[in-house]
Amino acid sequence: MARRETVFFCTECGYEVSKWTGVCPGCHAFNTMTEAPRESGRPAGNGASVRRIDLPKPLPLSAIPEESEERISTGMEELDRVLGGGVVSGSLILTGGDPGIGKSTLLLQAARNMAAGGKKILYISGEESLRQIKLRARRLGEFPDELRFLCETSLDAILKLLQEEKPAVVVIDSIQTMMKEDVSGTPGSPSQVRECTAQLLQTAKSLSITVFIIGHVTKEGTVAGPRMLEHMVDTVLYFEGDRHASYRILRGVKNRFGAVNEIGVFEMRSEGLAEVPNPSAFLLSGSAEQDSGSVVSCVIEGTRPLLLEVQGLVSRSAFGMARRTAAGVDYNRVNLLLAVLEKRCRLSLSDCDAYVNIAGGLRVNDPALDLAVILALYSSYRNLLLPPHLIVFGEVGLSGELRDVPFTEQRVQEALRLGYTSCLLPRASLNRGIKAKGMKLIGAAGLDEAIRYLHAASPARPESEEGGRA
Ligand code: TYD
Ligand code: MG
């Protein structure tokens, strides 16, 4: 009986099945199953295998030799931190992001810095010609000869070169342009992307070469995105940011050699990417003078505290259909917080539009932002000015209680560093014995207490501006 020679797998999560289905059983995405040849190495015949199998030998931890992993610095502190303290040799690092966000620029700069440290580096581009690369590199400054460039899309040729040259680091720009001869599909198709990555992984491990793979994040379709590769590689970095704004955020979403969710902040300049060592000041730099609806809070991204401005706007709906929008925070969370505000503070918001925005375009998941979101909306609704130099943070529960959040002291210290003098926070957090000289700590047990404080401490507006919706 002839065996099926192809399998179907999901372009989103890589789940593999032998028959086509409309919905992926793994991630429940629609219409993502793609046909691909059965991977070589797996026998398709039904004859019993006669290969002799050596008996595997499990080891206790104590018998495993300790290896101190060698790390190479990329010369960029922001990138090193996201990687967990530099590049581990022999690791495979996937760098994803929208086209044009700056992936090539970032890795070109990292490659240059590593080459300047005396390492042999290869930059292989399937996207740009050598002249284009030279044009770009000219804006970035001097390049040492240890860094060499190649335009190539044939993976077989690249693997051969790696075996011959054994560079310390190789950059593949991008995986969607690479093509392996004995695999079906055009470059960028799921089978090509998957197989090319698998081959690079094997080479990285066996020759101890660090491989950076660039992958474009693409809309669903026939071209495979980096999401499909996440499970194969050691480290996954995503480069995010508004293409029209100058700053970029590099986020680690998977790291076998360090903490995840670390972020690095960069600014795209005319001479390449510059590190932003003080992102709090950067994120707050555009904020207007203290006005209603604007609250400064502190979130933790990875291990670092970041100050940011939460903006809220509440206005009467024009068409009787209240609109809610959330940019930078979870939409459902904002709806939940609006419901808490409505019920616990007896506001009537059903005929109001409500908008929440994180200034600077950062995306945040930290529940410590709850209090700032609520107070920004409340202050806009009441047209209430917030006290100057105040930061607020705390998680808000469904009954309006304020809950303690981790890393309280780091948050307060960061605020202190940027010149803030008072901090509204959950009363439970005060029990932690925060050391913060020069910071006035105001603990509130619930939302009502926090709001009472705002009213008491709010600076008076000039008479002409008076008039909220109270
Ligand atoms: P690029 O690294 O080519 O993006 P990707 O590889 O992710 O597709 O970056 C392209 C953008 O960056 C392009 O719009 C131009 C801009 N850029 C600068 O602003 N300054 C620079 O020094 C460089 C090299 C690029
Ligand atoms: Mg590029």
Image (tube, grey):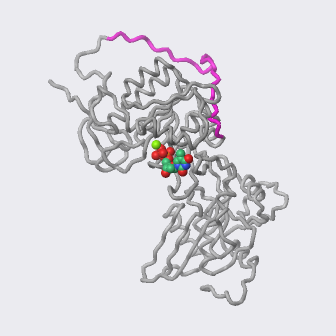
Please identify the quarter of the rendering in which residue 455 is found.
bottom right
The outermost residue toward the left is: 1
**Residue range of the region highlighted in magenta in the rendering:** 51-76
Please indicate, yes or no, whether residue 347 appears anywhere in the rendered image: yes
- Chief SS of the magenta region: loop
Q: Is residue 295 above or below residue 74?
A: below
Q: Residue furthest bottom?
A: 464
* Residue 121 spot, x, y in % from top left: 55, 27
Q: Position of residue 324 (x, y in %)?
A: 48, 71
> Would you say residue 101 is visible in this rendering?
no
Q: Is residue 314 magenta?
A: no
Q: Image check: 123 left or right of 393?
A: left
The N terminus - image quarter:
top left
Front residue of 31 and 446 = 31
The residue that appears at 42% across and 43% down in the rendered structure is 227
In the image, residue 269 lies at what x, y percent?
A: 59, 51
Q: Residue at x 55, y 17 (%)?
A: 59
* 339 vs 470: above or below: above
Compared to residue 190, the image places residue 293 above or below, namely below
Quadrant of residue 26 in the image? Answer: top left
Residue 206 or residue 287, whichever sits in front:
287
Quarter of the C terminus within the rendering:
bottom right
Which residue lies most toward the right here? Answer: 437
Q: Residue at x 67, y 74 (%)?
A: 448
Q: Is residue 276 left or right of residue 102?
A: right
